[in-house]
Image (tube, helix red, strand yellow):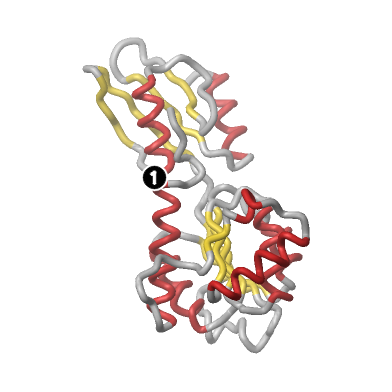
Amino acid sequence: MKADTFGALQTARRSKTPVALVIGIDGDGSEALVYADRVDSSLPEAVIAEARTRLRDDKTGVMEIGGTHWFIDCHNAPLRVIVVGAVHITQTLAPMAAIAGYEVIVVDPRASFATPERFPNVHLLDEWPDDAMVELAPDARTAVITLTHDPKLDDPALEVALNSEAFYIACLGSRRTHARRLDRLRALGFDEATLNRIHGPAGLPIGAVSPAEIAIAIMAELTSVLHEAGPLAVAA
């Protein structure tokens, strides 16, 4: 690998910027870095599109286009799910997300809720959500889900999430509850385009009723957003 390419790759990794290293296996072994919004060298459009798709889906591998083989090496920050509210739904959602490959962080200042007994092997933070969210700094590989039904806990977390690059933001609650939530956020200065980033009520509409079913619906929607309309689902 060329020194310039290696240096740029390390810079992207340190800043948690998603980037794909593309190397031409045939011919002169040309190499380039493909980002969500730019490419550092000329590449065929089909190669750029495939690199971005593979980067979005974390699929390192070899592809063939027009008789030429390319190796695409994907470098992403870890996927994270930040859940505000150590509630019954979270007890099912946390292990589901962990199995799907996410680092799970549960934020709840209520010590009786956020306990290791209720959430074994889960990163628990007993801080107020706004403080915790600033510390966690959601990025384009982070999902934020609020489940407490308490505006004192959910709204401050949403303020931070909406000002971040979090790829998925979702809130539990009925349509009426969500409408009131949006009114409160409008009063804080958020415009409609920003508010439209919130998935509310959280989860795909599959008729979920029990905590486990709601957790399934949320994970299904989160997965759909990640792979179909996530932060890297951009045109080549």
Q: For mark 1, what is the residue? A: 57
Number of on-image labels: 1
Q: Quadrant of residue 153?
A: bottom right
In the image, farthest residue toward the top = 28
Q: From the top left corner, tell me how far across and down residue 130 is, in percent.
A: 74, 65
Q: Is residue 205 left or right of residue 11?
A: left
Q: From the top left corner, tell me how far across and down residue 121 is, in percent.
A: 51, 74
Q: Is residue 159 above or below residue 85?
A: above
In the image, farthest residue toward the left = 67
- Say what amino acid the circle numbered 1 marks: Asp
Q: From the top left corner, tell me how far across and down residue 57 is, in percent.
A: 39, 45
Residue at 43%, 27% in the rendered image: 236
Residue at 45%, 29% in the rendered image: 21
Q: Secondary structure at mark 1?
A: helix
Q: From the top left corner, tell me how far across and down residue 221 is, in percent.
A: 42, 61
Most foreground residue, 185 or 28: 185
Q: Is residue 31 left or right of residue 85?
A: left
Residue at 67%, 79% in the rendered image: 150
Q: Is residue 114 left or right of residue 219?
A: right
Q: Quadrant of residue 157?
A: bottom right
